[in-house]
Image (cartoon, rainbow, N blue to C red):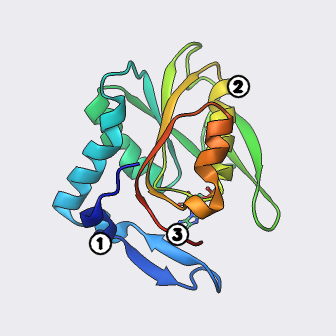
Amino acid sequence: MQHLKDLEDLIRTIPDYPRPGIMFRDITTLLADPKGLKKAIKSMAKPFEDEKVDAVVGIEARGFILGGAIADRLECGFIPIRKKGKLPWKTIGQEYTLEYGVDVIEIHEDAIEKGWRVLIVDDLIATGGTAEAAVKLVRRSGGTIVGATFIVDLPDLGGMKRLGALDIQSHALVAFGGH
Ligand code: AMP
């Protein structure tokens, strides 16, 4: 994995948010920096520039900001995955496990055409539960995953390994130890 020190320095860490023991990696400070934002988008898209990508799928909400810009770079469309109940048309949903309980994310049932090559985008991968649910939604929609791209990886939580076990090639720009 590449580790971009200048991007790391633009990410704000908020200890004990939203719960004691969590180090929240806040990318809003990076998004607000013109050079940082441009570099993050370029670097996230780069591994996929020579691939055929039919659509970028972004995960609510920070995945929308990054995913839209990456789709523009890769000259393909953007498809949102949202929390249950937010999309206006017919959806398919996928449950995933959180630390306490379960959650559901959804995609429009007609968003992905059979055989489309799809890139998954989010700001951060921790346990990989959210990204795995996104992978399942894309595959159930008939799409093939080209890869997954993130700004931040928390390797101690094993998300990228989990995606590897699903045969997904994933990339991140910065890694932070711990939770
Ligand atoms: P996970 O499903 O465990 O991989 O969690 C990934 C999702 O939760 C992403 O959409 C992140 O934005 C958010 N998230 C999880 N842990 C953190 C953290 N330490 N700092 C910021 N966002 C986080």
Q: Residues within 10 Å of mark 3 (few under 14, many from 20)?
A: few
Residue where numbered disc 2 is placed: 140
Residue where numbered disc 1 is placed: 9
Asked if the residue under mark 3 is in contact with the one under mark 1, i.e. CB atoms within 8 Å, the reply is no
Determine if residue 174 is in view: yes
Q: Residues within 10 Å of mark 2 (few under 14, many from 20)?
A: some
Q: Quadrant of ligand 1?
A: bottom right
Q: Residue at x 39, y 28 (%)?
A: 77
Label 1 or label 3, whichever comes before in sequence order = 1
Mark nearest the camera among 2 and 1 is: 1
Q: Position of residue 55 (x, y in %)?
A: 44, 27
Mark nearest the camera among 2 and 3 is: 3
Q: Is residue 170 left or right of residue 163?
A: left
Q: Nearer the viewer, residue 116 or 145?
A: 145
Q: Establish if 169 lies above or below 40.
A: above
Q: Establish if 15 lies above or below 154.
A: below
In which quadrant of the rendered view does residue 7 lie?
bottom left
Q: Is residue 54 left or right of residue 46?
A: right
Query: Amino acid under label 1?
Result: Asp
Cα–Cα gap, marks 1 and 3: 15 Å
Label 2 or label 1, whichever comes before in sequence order = 1
Residue where numbered disc 3 is placed: 177
Q: Nearer the viewer, residue 156 or 58?
A: 156
Q: Is residue 85 left or right of residue 146?
A: right
Query: Amino acid under label 3?
Result: Gly
Q: Establish if 47 lies above or below 9.
A: above
Q: Residue at x 59, y 72 (%)?
A: 179
Label 2 or label 3, whichever comes before in sequence order = 2
Q: Residue at x 29, y 45 (%)?
A: 43
Q: Which mark is residue 135?
A: none
